[in-house]
Amino acid sequence: MRSELHIDRRQFLGHLSLGGLVLNELLANTSGGGDRSPLSHHQPRAKNVIMLFMCGGTSHLETFDHKPQLRKWAGRKASQIFSKKDLQGFNPEKTVENCQILPPVFEFQQHGQSGAWVSEIFPRLSTVVDEITFLKSVRTDSAIHSVGEMIWHTGHQQAGFPSMGSWVTYGLGSEQTDLPAYVVMKDGVSTSGDEVFQQGMLPGRHQAAVAKVATGKTPFPNLVPRPNLKIEQQRKYLDALNQLNRLHRDRHPSQSDLNGRIEAFEMAFRMQNSATEVFDLSREPKSMHQLYGKNQFSKHCLTARRLVENGVRFVEIMDGAKGRLWDAHGNRGGLIGNHRSNAARTDQGITALITDLKARGMLDETLVIWATEFGRTPFEEANRETKMGRGHHHRGFTLWMAGGGLKKGVSYGATDELGMNAIVNPVHIHDIHATILHLLGIDHLKLTYRQNSQDVRLTDVFGNVIHEIVA
């Protein structure tokens, strides 16, 4: 009798056909923290978030920050225009004093009732600018790719802190019991790695579930049960495992991670049907595929809409992760080819997402964020090898958001006439994080987690809500 019951944990998980999914996505670091009620510090304006992150540092000067005065100073050395202090703190591997001022390489036009300036490389996005709130005076703390990505995602320069998506799900919980609350879709591993999606010291269930969108394939590993395993058998295996886990939990109440493990197995079981259906884009009509386009980024955008439509709280699409595709150095293909091709790849999907959400009445409660780790310098980078490019720049650049309780058709803040420094209503990344949480009904000062006798939060030790952009 003992031999029949005595199977090791790996064999048991094999019977469930859930081992890989649970290990990789749902059971990681499930220590610490128990159940908690969703926070509601004030009336929320948004319920869900879709974040579009462009890896590599998109140039504000070639996208949304029109600076015609750069043409006046074209060819002059940076040291002739800017102070010594202005030219310090950029990429430590390169010098900038002798770099020449570089005018915008694309044409700009004003669009919509708001008159927003948009580069020629985003022809579709220019048709929906009246839904967008541009933040044109953004500052961050580093011009290094990995650090910039880390600050945007976690609010901290060092690894080990929870990501924004983890904080949101920790504060608000999940709208669904059979789908992860936090899902990431990406096209590769970014400079900072998948550390930016981790839950840090928060309970493990707040870690991102990284999904793969591919026709005919499951979005999560090992989610499809073996052909000879009936659902009733799988349910019996899971019930037996949960019973053993609960017995052990009751005997060892200090091991709170067991609650997370029980929850993870239950969610994995339920996701076998729900996840497959939500990620199945063949369920969308032909018109939707035509609206969004056919490339991988477009598929991610369409999937993001399906996810928030089905109650997923926080969705991130990471574009250009493999190879930092938006990194517009001269020796990486050049600024012109780089940004023209990247914009062409993403323009349709982004525009379709905003258009689709609005048509379905979902944009008002869904916050769409377009972000990048930093901008680009107003001068050509030093040590250029082949084609023209711009260097890393963190003291003034542009991000934008749409929906989710924001004022529409607004451009907030400004850099100086050469796009160098944020001088009108400068906002730090922490201010943007505070505003995102505010729109979700959370006070960023109160969303904390006690760790080593310190209250940790997304906005670290400072940050203010940008009330001027809230409708």
Image: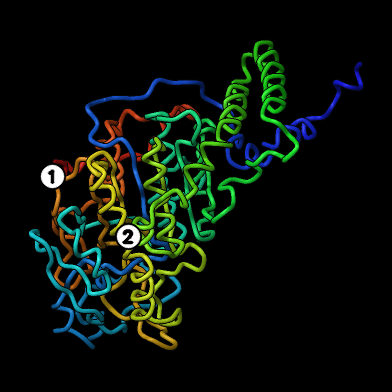
Q: Is residue 403 left or right of residue 149?
A: left
Instruction: Identify which amino acid the numbered label 2 is placed on.
Output: Leu
Which quadrant would the N terminus be assigned to in this image? Answer: top right
Q: Is residue 204 above or below residue 51?
A: above
Residue at 54% across, 56% down: 214
Residue 468 - label: 1
Lower sequence index among marks 1 and 2: 2
Q: Position of residue 193 (x, y in %)?
A: 53, 55
Of residue 294 and residue 404, the one placed in the foreground of this image is 294
Of residue 224 and residue 141, the one placed in the foreground of this image is 224
Which quadrant would the C terminus be assigned to in this image? Answer: top left
Question: Tag 2's secondary structure?
Answer: helix
Instruction: Identify which amino acid the numbered label 1 is placed on.
Output: Glu
Q: Is residue 328 above or below residue 395?
A: below
Residue at 75% across, 33% down: 15
Q: Position of residue 359 (x, y in %)?
A: 23, 48
Q: Position of residue 179 (x, y in %)?
A: 49, 35
Residue 318 occupies quadrant: bottom left
Residue labelled with disc 2: 291
